[in-house]
Amino acid sequence: MGASEMSEAADITMLLGRWAQGDESARDQVFALVYPQLRGIARQRAAGQQLGATTLVHEAYLKMVGGDADYRDRQHFFAVAATAMRQIVLDQLRYYATAKRQGLQAEITVEGMAASIDWSLERVASFEQGLKALAEQDADAVRVFECKFFAGYGTKETADAMGLSVRAVERHWTVSRRFLAAYVDPG
């Protein structure tokens, strides 16, 4: 992390503390600072989906503003953003699968899963069940999956955000992909 990135991370952490104390102007300043990165993450996640990157960021913002603002630091903030994006993407898949009743062809891929999955309601439910089952066995594996898959973090960024070694992140990433692939595409 360069000097300017460290300074920005410190600024964001300080602003998050002020936001947690009820300073709404600090909340607005946080989102002004992180918006470009959130937009980049959302652009990666929204590729091939019906939901655009701008909409995904705005929905994540609304979800986060409406919740508890007790973010420890920049990394924790982005980890929460990843979880918010996960919920939004899964809600979107459920909505379109329900609307089409036949399922939805969506380009949401994970290594070890089919390149294009027919996201029927059953598959979305299986994916969610897989995330819940994995969380019961290995909560860190789910958090790694959220950071890498839903937030678009790299391995090093995920390690920094979670306070884990790069090797531990790689291990959790492998475990989570294999585990979820078995839930979504058991054949």
Image (spheres, rainbow, N blue to C red):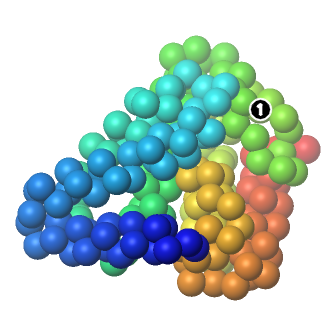
Residue plotted at (62% across, 39% down)? 44
As drawn, the residue found furthest toward the front would be 3
Q: Quadrant of the N terminus?
A: bottom right
Using residue 8 as the reference point, say whether residue 127 is left or right of it.
Answer: right
Q: Quadrant of residue 8 in the image?
A: bottom left
Does residue 156 appear in the picture of this structure?
A: yes
Using residue 148 as the reference point, say whether residue 178 is left or right of it.
Answer: right
Does residue 64 appear in the picture of this structure?
A: no
* Vertical side of 3 occupied by 56: above or below: above
Using residue 93 as the reference point, say whether residue 59 is left or right of it.
Answer: left
**Dot 1: what SS?**
strand
Residue plotted at (51% across, 17% down)? 99
* Vertical side of 92 occupied by 88: above or below: below
Q: Which residue is mark 1?
A: 117
Using residue 168 as the reference point, say whether residue 84 is left or right of it.
Answer: left
* Vertical side of 153 occupied by 164: above or below: below
Q: Residue 35: x and y, percent?
A: 39, 46
Q: Residue 143: x and y, percent?
A: 57, 68
Residue plotted at (28% across, 57% down)? 30
Q: Quadrant of the C terminus?
A: top right
Q: Residue 41: x and y, percent?
A: 55, 46
Q: Quadrant of residue 172 in the image?
A: bottom right
Q: Nearer the viewer, residue 124 or 173?
A: 173
Q: Residue 26: x and y, percent?
A: 17, 60
